Image (cartoon, rainbow, N blue to C red):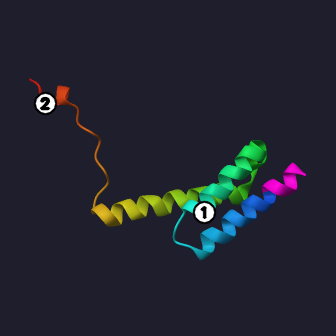
Amino acid sequence: MATLLTCTYISLAITTAERQEESAVPVLHLMEAERIAPEILTFNIRSRALLADLLSRERQSVTLVSGQWPSAPVSSADHEH
């Protein structure tokens, strides 16, 4: 039962990712699949490919919005000499 439900959530995540630019809904489906059966999500090739795609989308959106990668935060200790 858990296997079927987990595969259903993975399929929903893939379908919603293909139809939306927003990545929140597919991520929620993957999180639910992970809650039910993390071992299936870990070894499922489709879910791993989707995660890679969602991460790539997020990186591209950060780059497109800011024009550059976010820099590391600078602490006040770095400015003291």
Nearest the eye: 14 or 56: 14
Residue that protrudes farthest toward the right in the picture:
1
Can you tell which of label 2 and label 1 is closer to the viewer? Answer: 1
Which amino acid, by three-letter code, is at mark 1?
Val
At a point 46% along the width and 60% down the height, the residue shown is 58
Residue at 75% of width from left, 53% of height from top?
44
Q: Secondary structure at mark 1?
A: helix
**Tag on residue 25?**
1
Give the amino acid type for the residue marked by disc 2 in the picture.
His
Lateral position of residue 33 relative to residue 64, left or right: right
The foreground one among 73 and 31 is 31
The earlier-in-sequence mark between 2 and 1 is 1
Q: Position of residue 38 (x, y in %)?
A: 74, 43
Residue 27: x and y in percent read 60, 57
Give residue 79's mark: 2
The magenta segment: 1-6
